[in-house]
Image (tube, rainbow, N blue to C red):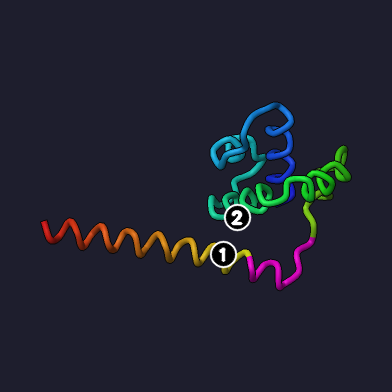
Amino acid sequence: MDEIFKIANQLHAQGQTPTTALIKARLSKPVPIPTIISALQRWKQNPDQYKSQTSENTGTTSAQTEPTQTQDQKIAELQEQVALLQRQVSQLARRLSMLEMS
């Protein structure tokens, strides 16, 4: 997630509004969309908090910039992803029901 915060900060510094698509295009390796969305939402809530975190890591390799996540953080991230997927499934089920009725 640190790379996502770093990219969001770079885009912001360039006068661009960080979006999921812009961040995804700049990532060094594939990251699931729900993870990008979650990180971007956190960044938007308090960009200054994440600016200080990423500026400390400038000049380090990507392996060094990836913070070790605690089990609780990993669980919380997965729960967010599951909640997002559940909402998407519910929306799709409603759309399917509406299509079947017509």
Q: Residue furthest front?
A: 45
The part of the image, by quadrant, that contains residue 100 is bottom left
Q: Which residues are magenta?
A: 68-76
Q: Amino acid at mark 1?
A: Glu
Which one is nearer the viewer's eye here, 17 or 2? 17
Where's residue 39, x and y in %? 64, 52
Q: Which mark is residue 80?
A: 1
The CA span between labels 2 and 1 is 7 Å
User: Is residue 99 found left or right of 64 in the rendered image?
Assistant: left
First of labels 2, 1 by sequence position: 2
Q: Amino acid at mark 2?
A: Ser
Residue at point 64% right, 68% down? 76
Q: Are marks 2 and 1 in contact (CB under 8 Å)?
A: yes
Which one is nearer the viewer's eye here, 44 or 70? 44
Residue at point 77% right, 48% down? 50
Q: Which mark is residue 38?
A: 2
